[in-house]
Image (tube, helix red, strand yellow):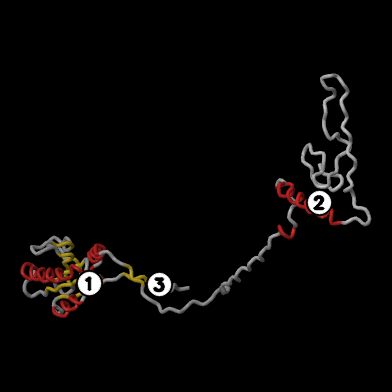
Amino acid sequence: MNCKACNTRLSGGQKVCPNCGHADNEVPFIDTPDSDASGSEPEVAEKLSPSTLGAPSDGADPSLFEGGEIEFEEEIEMALREAAPEERPAPTARASSKKTKAPKRKAKEVEAPPVRENAPRSRRSPVNVVIPVDPEQVRHLIVERPEVLEANLAVHVDEDGIEVGAGYETEVGEIDLLARSEAGDWVVVMVVATPTDQESAITGMINRIGWVRKHLSDGEQVVRGVVLTGATSEELVYAAAALKDSVTFLGWRLSLGFDVLAA
């Protein structure tokens, strides 16, 4: 409750303004019991006369009310501090608004140049496609078609006309193909499986040629050898130069070719 004269805040139960001395006329100053023990009528407290510190009249000194106004403003500020958060005034829209940053522009994507249809390819010279061949396939081929090595070359046959030259057994090792030329020469054919077998194959070829000369040739027939290999080496080249009169070294390859068909 505030004082009606100077608007000073009064605590609960306080009837007289501590600032201006004004008393509320509607409320008794002192609460007294209805009657005392003797049954006599209770005395009524006299009402205080109105305060002379009411609204200032013309010519009154305004400095008399300055203290009350200052205390009144302090009371309002204190009440605002003690107010609940939801009772406090909301901040202005300008204070609560946040600055929004402008979105960054995405980097311009570099477009790939368009692909031209039917664009000419770089020209390449024709090449031979070499297909790897297993040594066992080579052995089978020369037995079935010995003429691929030399024209009119045939597999050796025994006295009964049976071909026995494929995988011919000797005391110094097996001969992959023992064949006869058109002139009646003995031809010893050996297939070298891997480059690591080339050195031993040369020694084996010399031994087999010597065995055929001793046991099959009549002394007038020529005995010569053919070494087939899928790879060459420096050692093999030297051996071919040393044995060129009696041994021929051939390399095999299987290539893929195309022929134009007649219209």
Instruction: Measure the alpha-carbon separation of dots 3 and 1.
Output: 28 Å
- Image mark for residue 236: none
Q: With respect to residue 71, does 137 lie above or below?
A: below
Q: Is residue 120 left or right of residue 54?
A: left
Q: Count the marks: how many?
A: 3
- Element at label 3: loop
- Give the quarter of the image for residue 61: bottom right
> Quick check: marks 1 and 2 in contact, CB under 8 Å?
no
- Give the quarter of the image for residue 233: bottom left
- Image mark for residue 152: 1
- Per the image, the residue denoted by label 2 is 68
- Per the image, the residue denoted by label 3 is 258
Q: Which amino acid lies under the numbered mark 1 shown in the image of this protein? A: Asn
**Of 127 and 197, which appears nearest the observer?**
197
Question: Between tags 2 and 3, which lies in front?
Answer: 2
Q: Position of residue 60 (x, y in %)?
A: 90, 55
Q: Residue at 77% across / 51% down in the picture?
A: 71
Q: With respect to residue 126, does 4 lie above or below?
A: above
Q: Is residue 85 left or right of residue 160?
A: right
- Element at label 1: loop
Q: Position of residue 39 (x, y in %)?
A: 86, 19
Neighbourhood count class around disc 1 (C-alpha, 10 Å): few under 14, some 14–19, many 20 upward: few
Image quadrant where one finds the N terminus: top right
Q: Residue at 24% across / 62% down in the picture?
A: 136
Q: Which amino acid lies under the numbered mark 3 shown in the image of this protein? A: Phe
